[in-house]
Image (cartoon, rainbow, N blue to C red):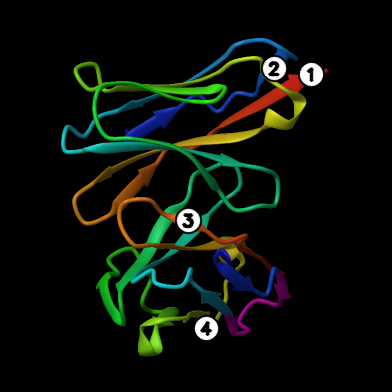
Amino acid sequence: EAGVVQSPRYKIIEKKQPVAFWCNPISGHNTLYWYLQNLGQGPELLIRYENEEAVDDSQLPKDRFSAERLKGVDSTLKIQPAELGDSAVYLCASSSGSEQYFGPGTRLTVT
Amino acid sequence: QKEVEQDPGPLSVPEGAIVSLNCTYSNSAFQYFMWYRQYSRKGPELLMYTYSSGNKEDGRFTAQVDKSSKYISLFIRDSQPSDSATYLCACGYAGNMLTFGGGTRLMVKP
């Protein structure tokens, strides 16, 4: 069974530029999560989807971040415009119950 | 104060040692507990999942939960250099929400 797929794996952009990350969850997993992980810290939830509905986006900085999960399968997280402080690893996870399975993450560097 | 606390380490042990990794949490609403292993530049990998107080064993790994003390542990027996990674504890409650600790970096030296 394929795991959670994320792309790109690495992205380097200049500040004020837009960037997008893509995630394809494990087949059959209705719940999809986007996390942010800073160096030396644990993942922090940005947004959680149940099928195509965002059920928890309280930690998503909505002035610059947006996300969508069309058709309740894969999802895109966008940042526009990016700031230096957005440099981090963006992790996608999926679940069909309590156990969450993570993708490899996208490492974003904003210069 | 964070809801889930871990000593960041690094914890350095010789190969073959028994490793003890610990977390404390403050939210009594947490119902289930997980341990993830994260290698450098990789995503977290689910190792253990426990729902109640007590012990759960899986090969060389034992997860222990003490809800009365709000204390969770992961023991690794016969540690190997391949166990060198960051170990994240996570606490969850209804709605499939997880709160992660900051992780403990483990180094097992040959």
Q: What's the CA distance linking mark 3 and mark 1?
A: 29 Å
Residue positioned 21% across, 34% down in the render: B27
Badge 3 marks a residue whose secondary structure is strand
Badge 1 marks a residue whose secondary structure is strand
**Residue that numbered label 4 is attached to:** A80
**Residue that numbered label 1 is attached to:** B109
Q: What's the CA distance linking mark 2 and mark 1?
A: 7 Å
Reading the chain from its start, which is encountered first: label 2 or label 1?
2
Q: Are marks 3 and 4 on the same chain?
A: yes
Viewer-nearest of discs 1 and 4:
1
Q: Amino acid at mark 1?
A: Lys
B1 and B30: which one is in front?
A: B30
Residue B42 location, x and y as percent?
Answer: 66, 52
Above/below status of A14 relative to B14: below
Reading the chain from its start, which is encountered first: label 3 or label 4?
4
B63 and A34: which one is in front?
A: B63
Badge 4 marks a residue whose secondary structure is loop
Viewer-nearest of discs 3 and 2:
3
**Residue that numbered label 2 is attached to:** B12
Q: Amino acid at mark 3?
A: Tyr
Badge 2 marks a residue whose secondary structure is strand
Residue A53 location, x and y as percent?
Answer: 27, 80
Viewer-nearest of discs 4 and 2:
2
Q: Are marks 2 and 1 on the same chain?
A: yes
Residue positioned 83% across, 17% down in the render: B110
Q: Residue furthest bottom?
A: A71
Q: Is residue A17 magenta?
A: yes
Q: Chain of mark 2?
A: B
Q: Are marks 1 and 4 on the same chain?
A: no
Q: Are marks 2 and 1 in contact (CB under 8 Å)?
A: yes
Q: Quadrant of residue A82?
A: bottom right
